[in-house]
Amino acid sequence: MKIKPEFDLIPESGWRKKVYEVIFLSDTKAGKNFDIILLILILASTIIIMIETIPIFQVKYYKEFYYLELFITIIFTIEYILRIICIKDREEYIFSPLGIIDFLSIVPFYFSLFFPIWHFVAIIRMLRILRIFRIFNLADYMNDGKFIVSALKHSSRKIYIFLLFISIFIIIIGSVMYIVEDGKNGFSSIPQSIYWAVVTITTVGYGDISPGTPLGKLLSIIVMLCGYSIIAVPTGIVTSEFRKQKSNTPCKRCGNQEMDENARYCKICGERIEN
């Protein structure tokens, strides 16, 4: 099966076309091998960054890690430049999601030359692993991903309202706990008390702050019980959207997909819907 290219603006001829076929396409042996090598480099870079945070390895193999990361970053930089050069409309690639990810995967290393802590931000290049779906013909998985994104998008308004309510509730609870505990037992300020409210209502429970007064403990019990029901709300909203989208069969005549769950006829053209 011929794999559809990421971008359709292919150069007509010359070396740019050959480079395009290797870098952007994976239906040829050279293109697939190129992408597999990139995946190996991405995984190697990620492993290096993670191991580098272990103190004993950081001290012992600092130079080795640095030169390996320098080599991988140079490869990614050359690849990024070639992607820009060999495509007709450069802006289409540069401002595309994959283009932005490719750019962000090389920038942290160069920033780290002036701000060392930025070196670890390079872990973002793990996002380039998403190309594995294209390389190994896993397009159906991408369609499933679009289904999830679509469900989240359609339920976003309800979730925003829910988050607004939770934010107000947490601020009020944190302020009340500050008053009840009288600034003691770790509740030294309202922001600190709000932190406790977030940890408690999400049922995480770090235990670094806990109420000491009877009224504070009673209030914390109420917050804990509310936490269980609050967690279920966004889950129910998104799940409901999943069911709604699955129940909607696109209209064969006009392609309309925004129909009621139990609709028998399309509300746009009146075509009978076969569920």
Image (tube, rainbow, N blue to C red):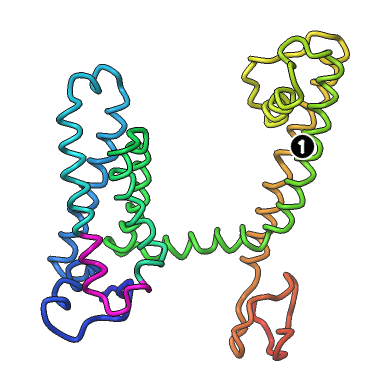
Q: Nearer the viewer, residue 67 or 125?
A: 67
Q: Specify whether residue 244 is painted magenta.
A: no
Instruction: Return the x and y of residue 224 as percentages of the image width and height.
Output: 76, 26
Q: Nearer the viewer, residue 33 or 119?
A: 119
Say which residue label 1 marks.
229
Mainly helix, strand or loop, the magenta region? helix
Q: Secondary structure at mark 1?
A: helix
Q: Residues within 10 Å of mark 1 (few under 14, many from 20)?
A: few
Query: Quadrant where the C terminus lies?
Result: bottom right
Placement of 150 over or under 110, stated as above or below: below
Image point 18% across, 50% down: which residue? 74
Corner quadrant of residue 255: bottom right
The total number of labels drawn is 1
Instruction: Return the x and y of residue 211 as percentages of the image width and height.
Output: 77, 13
Placement of 60 over or under 164, stated as above or below: above
Image point 70% across, 56% down: which residue? 240
* Residues shaded magenta: 79-92
Instruction: Return the x and y of residue 152 as percentages of the image width and height.
Output: 61, 57
In the image, taking residue 95 as reference, residue 71 lies left or right, namely: left
Corner quadrant of residue 185: top right
Query: Quadrant where the N terminus lies?
Result: bottom left
In the image, taking residue 72 as reference, residue 275 lies left or right, namely: right
Placement of 103 over or under 211, stated as above or below: below
Residue situated furthest front in the rendering = 114
In the image, taking residue 88 as reference, residue 171 lies left or right, namely: right
Placement of 209 over or under 248, stated as above or below: above
Tell me the kind of residue under disc 1: Ser
Instruction: Return the x and y of residue 228 as percentages of the image width and height.
Output: 73, 33
Corner quadrant of residue 258: bottom right
